[in-house]
Image (spheres, rainbow, N blue to C red):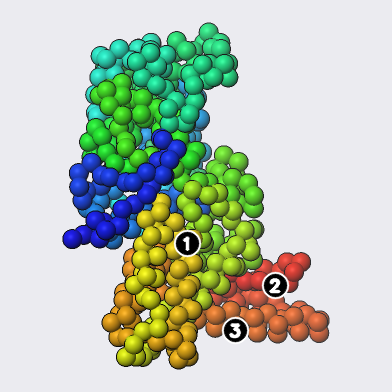
Amino acid sequence: MQLYQSNPIKLYNSLTGKKETFKPINEGHIGMYVCGPTVYSNVHLGNVRTFMSFDMVFRYLKHLGYKVRYVRNITDAGHLENDADAGEDKITKKARLEQIEPMEVVQRYTVDFHNILNTLNFLPPSIEPTATGHIIEQIELISKIIENGFAYEVNGSVYFDVHKFNETYEYGKLSKRKLEDLIHNTRVLDGQSDKKNPQDFALWKKAEPQHIMRWPSPWSDGFPGWHLECTAMSTKYLGEQFDIHGGGMDLKFPHHECEIAQNEAAKGKSPVNYWMHANMLELNGQRMSKTTGNTVNPDELLSGNNKFFTKAYGPSVIRFFNAMSSYRSILDLTNDGLLASEKGFNRLMDAVNLLDDLKASSTSSIGVLAWKQKCYDAMNDDFNSPILLAHLFEAAKYINQIKEGSETLSSEDLDILKDTINIFVYDVLGLKNTAKSESGTDKLSGAVDVLIRLRQDARANKDFAMSDKIRDELAEVGIHLKDGKDGTTFSTN
Ligand code: AMP
Ligand code: ZN
């Protein structure tokens, strides 16, 4: 008997707007696709939040005994800004600015992405396909959509005919938009565009002479439209219909809506049974976004080298922070929130580190099995990590009470407590026991604080040579002091 048989999951399906009991197409197997990053710049913490939420989902499904095929793509074909019809693609633009090959841009930021995810203790997906590795599949898909009458070619470019599609299918069913409203809210075409209607979207674009990333096709030397790669790669690796498709909320429209339309137009089938959308990470109350520049990158938070936060935070604190809210809620990255999660993480780990010292008794005064089930129930309820954390803190309280002798556990129950904590803290939430290194960090902070105070004394005595010496010698060993209006802080890198 596998754990998933006794743990049915209720999953919020963005397509139906309801929590539904999850049932995979093939018992015991799950196909899950998550839209990956566009590798033209460093990932920011907003991107990481979405991927981290699905890392937790992947971890929990695996823990339940499902065989999960998790596909997360790399978007390495340049797409035009905002899916526009003209102009330069994001990767080529970066290549021009940095005077390197587009594929060098792609390589640089793919490596950065992997390094960051590794540092943050992500599990690798089962398959990580690239858009440029699947041009042939994308071309085949376009041919099929044209053949079925839902796309048309103009001047070497191919567009998806949304109006035609909507006569047979329902465009907008995921994002709950109506084509009439979309028509009403979009500007009329200015006569320059090749499209029949503004709502149509590109499946293939003919490359302008200066466009570097290009491939031959039956229509022109060009490049695929943004939405096509995910349809091509999900179909190839998970089939025409699969279980879960995830991504950030901002991708629901147009990206995921168009994915559904492409699949239906090519194969006559809605591709995904459960759509999951992770909510946005904000930075001090505003959406974190590459376009507005309101971003913090993971390495800036890990090193403390940023203008927003007073100190550096470890990888497990970042994971803990993410788990403190449901993946479906907006999460605001603030100094107070990070400090609170650091405190919470340390408190939880202090209790976990007492586990091996606990002595078993002949009887149990705590219902460990009921507590264990509550942990599963939390995750079975649409991966509710904040509720799971509340139960883990309940266990932290038990651990302290058992240590003090006010509660008892039999040796069998003690084993259940230890196993369950290990499962949820390490396997599911992906936290790491950083007790040793964290206490090392505490000692380092203490020592640097002593030096900061000595430097303040030196300044008060107008001994600026000594003050500078302390700052410079600390910098030589990688500890950088930062003088601000609230005093001096430090960062390491
Ligand atoms: P991109 O590289 O822009 O294609 O984005 C990669 C992933 O990050 C997508 O799933 C986006 O939905 C997600 N994403 C972008 N910004 C945020 C944000 N502020 N919070 C959460 N997820 C985000
Ligand atoms: Zn996608």
Q: Earlier in the sequence, mark 3 or mark 2?
A: 3
Name the disc covering residue 72, or none: none
Of circles 1 and 3, the one toward us is 1
Q: Earlier in the sequence, mark 1 or mark 3?
A: 1
For mark 3, give the secondary structure.
Answer: helix
The residue indicated by pointer 3 is 447
Classify residue 105 by image quadrant. top left
Name the disc covering residue 387, or none: 1
Q: Earlier in the sequence, mark 2 or mark 1?
A: 1
Q: Residue at x 34, y 77 (%)?
A: 418
> Image height check: is 386 above or below 463?
above
Can residue 286 be seen in the rendering of this structure?
A: yes
The residues tagged by marks 1 and 3 sit, at their Cα atoms, a distance apart of: 37 Å
Q: Could you say which is closer to the camera, residue 71 or residue 310?
A: 71
The residues tagged by marks 3 and 2 sit, at their Cα atoms, a distance apart of: 14 Å
Classify residue 207 by image quadrant. top left
Q: Residue at x 44, y 25 (%)?
A: 172
The quarter of the picture where the N terminus appears is: bottom left
The residue indicated by pointer 2 is 488
**Of all residues shown, which one is farthest toward the top?**
191
Q: Residues within 10 Å of mark 1 (few under 14, many from 20)?
A: many
For mark 2, give the secondary structure.
Answer: strand
The residues tagged by marks 2 and 1 sit, at their Cα atoms, a distance apart of: 37 Å
Q: Amino acid at mark 1?
A: Ile
> Image height check: is 458 above or below 77?
below
Q: Residue at x 49, y 79 (%)?
A: 397
For mark 1, give the secondary structure.
Answer: helix
User: Which percent across, then down, holds residue 39?
Assistant: 42, 43
